[in-house]
Amino acid sequence: MKRAISFLLAALCFIYYLWIGLNNDFGLSLLPVWLVLALLFLVLGLAGPLRLPKRLRRWLRAGLAVLLALFLTVEGFILSGMTRRCEDGLDCLIVLGAALQGDGPSVSLEGRLEAALDYLERNPETAVIVSGGQGVSEVMSEARCMANWLTERGVDPARIRMEEQSTSTAENLRYSLALLGESERRIGVITSNFHVFRALGIARRLAGDNLEFSGLAADFPPRLLPHYLMREFCSVCADTLRGNLRWL
């Protein structure tokens, strides 16, 4: 039974690796994790029971239990941010950038922009900061692309501020916070649903108790969600170790 489960998990991981890889030219970061998991489950299925000293088996089980508990705890916090909705009447929104597709937004970035547009239409007094620099393969900065997208759909350019230097989430927020006016204290952060918890944690670490943050979770393609939840676990752990993240 255990061997059958191992083979099934290996097949599922390999199929998922091929599925999202073929649909994204195998360009997603950390994509090989699924191939590694497939190989690991395959080896576990092919190998017989491990003949290890009892004490070593005990330590391995304890280590795996701790790792699983950590993974589930972090994923629980990540999932808690996936349904966040900003209250109306905020002073300013910060829309975090994502990769472009040609001279337009990618699917994930467009989801963030649609969430921002909906909020801005309901709250005409709220300003917006679009945040994102220009990647090596991008024809313009992510901020410029976002500003173009919003203005083409009727948002007054006077409401839009661009932050075009950042290359990471921490920089997105650090440079965007520097563009806030003195009277802007209630801030909304818009990003993809899996990313909200980490983005808010970084924002709170940067601003301390000086600002009030709320998150708005934008829709994200469901087929990619398992991969990005896995990737986000690694990012949350890394930002925590670097001291970038305030959990509560």
Image: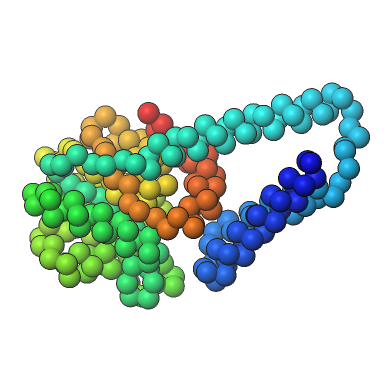
Residue 230, given in percent of the width and then of the height, sits at 54, 47
Q: Residue 239 vs residue 248: left or right?
A: right
Task: Please identify the residue farthest to the left as the structure is shown.
Answer: 125
Q: Is residue 165 visible?
A: no
Task: Please identify the residue farthest to the front as the structure is shown.
Answer: 1
**Which residue is depicted at the point 8% across and 49% down?**
125
Residue 145: image quadrant is: bottom left
Residue 30: image quadrant is: bottom right
Q: Nearer the viewer, residue 199 or 230?
A: 230
Of the 4 image quadrants, the one containing the C terminus is top left
Tell me if residue 76 comes above or below residue 113 in the rendering.
above
Residue 94, given in percent of the width and then of the height, sits at 25, 50
Question: Looking at the image, what colour scheme do you see?
Answer: rainbow
**Which residue is depicted at the point 16% across and 59% down?**
160
**Which residue is depicted at the point 39% across and 72% down?**
101
Tell me if residue 205 comes above or below residue 178 in the rendering.
above
**Which residue is depicted at the point 29% across and 45% down?**
216
Tell me if residue 241 comes above or below residue 144 in the rendering.
above
Of the 4 image quadrants, the one containing the N terminus is top right
Residue 68: image quadrant is: top right
- The count of marks equals 0
Residue 40, given in percent of the width and then of the height, sits at 75, 49
Q: Is residue 27 visible?
A: yes
Residue 143, given in percent of the width and then of the height, sits at 28, 63
